[in-house]
Image (spheres, rainbow, N blue to C red):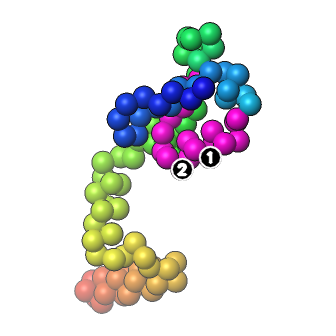
Amino acid sequence: MTTPATGSGSSLVVSALHARANFGKLLDRVEKERRSLVIEKRGTPKAVLLSLQDYIRLAAPEPEILRIIGEDAERKGTSRLSPKQIEREIRAARAQIKKRSC
């Protein structure tokens, strides 16, 4: 039986038997709802199932500078540039630097 904890984004608690019988559905739910899943055996928590996205966030948190750069790119709209557009921008910036140094 699944027993949700209180609060948004909280963990779901399920028995190991329920997890084994419903693993595919629970995988989908963990990913879709961005919630962790605590698996209990005989009433004792034994493991946690996380979405891959949440695991990466916990295992390798984004450095503060990358978060700031990402937010700046979103604000300026540069996060939507294609690789070709980025290459053009780099070439143009390098050409300007070269002109200044001559």
In percent of the image, x 72 and y 28: which residue is there? 20
As drawn, the label of residue 28 is 1
**Residue 62 in the image, given as x and y percentages of width and height:** 39, 46
Residue nearest the viewer, comparing 69 with 90: 69
Residue nearest the viewer, comparing 65 with 36: 36
Mark 1–mark 2 CB contact (< 8 Å): yes
**SS assignment for the magenta stretch, majority:** helix
**Residue 24 in the image, given as x and y percentages of width and height:** 70, 41
Which amino acid lies under the numbered mark 1 shown in the image of this protein? Asp
**Residue 33 in the image, given as x and y percentages of width and height:** 49, 46
Determine whether 43 is above or below 34 in the image. above
Residues drawn in magenta:
22-39
Determine which residue is flagged by label 2.
32
36 horizontally vs 22: left or right: left
In percent of the image, x 48 and y 39: which residue is there? 35
Q: Secondary structure at mark 1?
A: helix
What's the distance in space between the residues labelled 1 and 2, CA to CA? Answer: 6 Å
The quadrant of the rendering that contains the C terminus is: bottom left
102 horizontally vs 89: left or right: left
